[in-house]
Image (spheres, grey):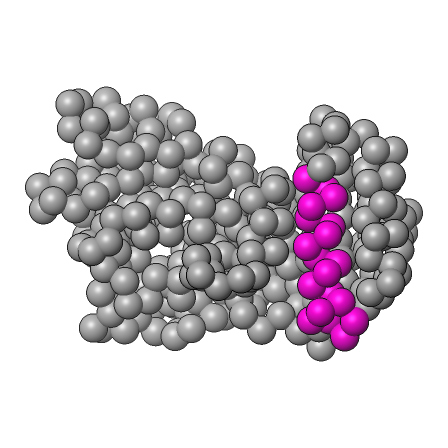
Amino acid sequence: MTSAATVDDPFVHPALFYRGEQQYVAGTVPFILDGLAAGEPVAVAAPPARLETIKGALGDDARAVRFVDMTQAGRNPGRIIPGVLRSFADAQRPGRVRIIGEPIWAGRTELEYPACVQHEALINMAFAGRDVTILCPYDADGLDERVLADALATHPVIVEESRETVSTAYDPDKAVARYNTALPTPPGAAAYAFAAPELPDVRHFAVEQGERLGLTAIRLQDLALAVAELTTNSVIHGAGRGTLRIWDEGGQVVCEVHDSGRLTDPLAGRRPPPPHRPGGRGLMLVHHLSDLVRVHTGTDGTTIRFYLPAS
């Protein structure tokens, strides 16, 4: 990943700092109309209230735009690149595509926020060289200064009151690294150490614990699938063994798998593999099934933690 905007890169990734509905409309609607006038496919992924604002301002032109509720499709920030941005852009080739993506809004939790920043930083790597423009709105009144500072690090260009400026703080590599923080495990978590012979047993253990912690039948299936993918990855890529831990945290069931492997691809689980290539979909499946995924990788190995609602 480059830490500086590439002048000849066709990918464009500005952040829109807006204050109030009038500035929001002024920053998004002309962007959409310009795209439609140029024959470019346009998608808008934002919280429901923002979608309604844009639809109302567009009038009949809204019928030509794809709208996505980001609070659902992007509840887990790790799903946004493959499930929202890439799924739309990849279906429109060839030609330029325009997308409005608003992944951070007032109400995002402190638990979710690091994954949101890493998502914004990784967009630059995921779309490098692509004929895509992704405009990311930020509510400058509703979000704190830390969020706006992080936006400067993850976007090469900032738009504010119709003025574009180059972000001198742009450094997506540093943003990803800053939020690659250790994930402490509570002392009461149930744990199971495993190697290849224990793969069936560790999955049964996770399901038993999930049932004890209140997961519904459908969510137990999600837990079983996610655990199967992560524990198998540990055996194949993590020196043949790992440790699973599971616990309850504020109405969510949290499960993590730690092994001694080092995750070197920051887009792992976010870059859809080519259709003809077998495998490579395990972590992406975990992102798809979970409300949130957090990852920490360092000298002592890699921890992948995922969250499921208990009811």
Asked if residue 242 lies left or right of residue 177, the reply is right
Q: Which quadrant of the structure image shows residue 120?
A: bottom left
Viewer-proximal residue among 114 and 309: 309
Q: Position of residue 129 (x, y in %)?
A: 28, 68
Say whether residue 132 is magenta.
no
Q: Which quadrant of the structure image shows residue 65?
A: top left
Tell me the quadrant of the picture where the C terminus can be found: top right
The residue that appears at 68% across and 39% down in the rendered structure is 222
The residue that appears at 74% across and 29% down in the rendered structure is 217
The residue that appears at 54% across and 70% down in the rendered structure is 265
Q: Position of residue 96 (x, y in %)?
A: 19, 54
Main SS class of the magenta portion in the image: helix
Q: Position of residue 113 (x, y in %)?
A: 56, 48
Q: Position of residue 55 (x, y in %)?
A: 25, 26
User: Which residues, given as a range, are shown in magenta?
Assistant: 222-240
The residue that appears at 37% across and 51% down in the rendered structure is 86
Q: Which quadrant of the structure image shows residue 100?
A: top left
Q: Is residue 67 above or below residue 11?
A: above
Tell me the quadrant of the picture where the N terminus can be found: bottom left
Q: Residue furthest bottom?
A: 299
Viewer-proximal residue among 180 and 74: 74
Q: Is residue 300 above or below residue 233?
A: below
Viewer-proximal residue among 242 and 154: 242
Is residue 262 visible in the rendered image? The answer is yes
Is residue 140 visible in the rendered image? The answer is no
Say whether residue 238 is magenta.
yes
